[in-house]
Image (tube, rainbow, N blue to C red):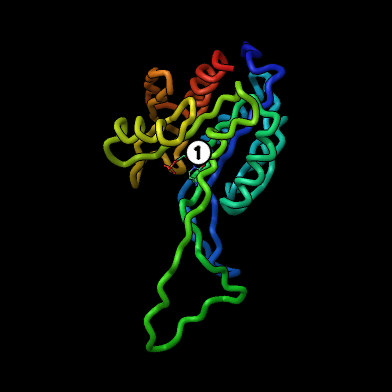
Amino acid sequence: ATVADLAGRHVVVSAGGTREPLDPVRYLGNRSSGKQGYALARVAAARGARVTLIEANTGLPDPAGVDVVRVGTAVQLREAVLKAAADADAVVMAAAVADFRPAEYAGGKIKKKEGQDPAPLSLVRNPDILAEISADRANPGQVVVGFAAETDDVLANGREKLRRKGCDLLVVNEVGERKTFGSEQNEAVVLAADGGETPVPYGPKEALAEIVWDLVAPRL
Ligand code: C5P
């Protein structure tokens, strides 16, 4: 039987990947499937939490017993996370948030012009939601968890990112063409701000989710 160690807690999980529109038909996006975030939401609900799942572009069905908020862009994700985090005991940012968005949105479809080079794409920075909620905790005991997908120097980059973002836990995984994205499996190391390091062997995303909540629960 599952232990209801998150009973009476409100947790917020973000999942999926933001899409940053260029015009009504095109966007800049990423390959996040949302499966890890959904696994985190399902497991938290099974362990007794009230769960707000903020999903961006996953196309996945709503998990039972979870409040789902749908967003598209990083700016919308930020609004939804800040709102839900106001009374949350823990926030887990599993979503892949675009670092940049097009500086301008064209109200009509951008046309190609014969014989002309394409116009350069100018981008502006998106807000860093994880850094912001870590710095301005809605309540002092709130636990904040981030994810980091790295392609090289995974642990060194992960430790640096944990410090820079200011979160309590950072789940670091190695990604590549054939790794993690869209897969049912994941392999990771969970780094803690207090120095802890928990390796998570290759396995289902549910198993990683259980370990994340095992690490969050005693910190609440
Ligand atoms: O900096 P990087 O994108 O690698 O950091 C990943 C972590 O930061 C994830 O938890 C992601 O949800 C979060 N993030 C964010 N806002 C951004 C970029 C990333 O909250 N603009």
Residue that label 1 marks: 131
| Label 1 beta carbon within 8 A of ligand 1 | yes
- Of residues 93 and 3, the one drawn nearer to the viewer in this rendering: 93
Residue 44 makes an appearance in the image: no
Q: Is residue 165 left or right of residue 107?
A: left
Report x, y in % for residue 92. 55, 32
Amino acid residing under circle 1: Ala
From this view, report whether residue 115 is shown above or below residue 76.
below
- Of residues 115 and 180, the one drawn nearer to the viewer in this rendering: 115
Quarter holding residue 49? top right
Q: Residue at x 40, y 24 (%)?
A: 191
What is the secondary structure assignment of the residue under circle 1? Answer: helix
Q: Is residue 171 left or right of residue 48?
A: left
Report x, y in % for residue 140. 61, 23
Q: Residue at x 55, y 63 (%)?
A: 21
Q: Is residue 66 left or right of residue 180?
A: right
Residue 179 makes an appearance in the image: yes
Q: Residue at x 52, y 38 (%)?
A: 130
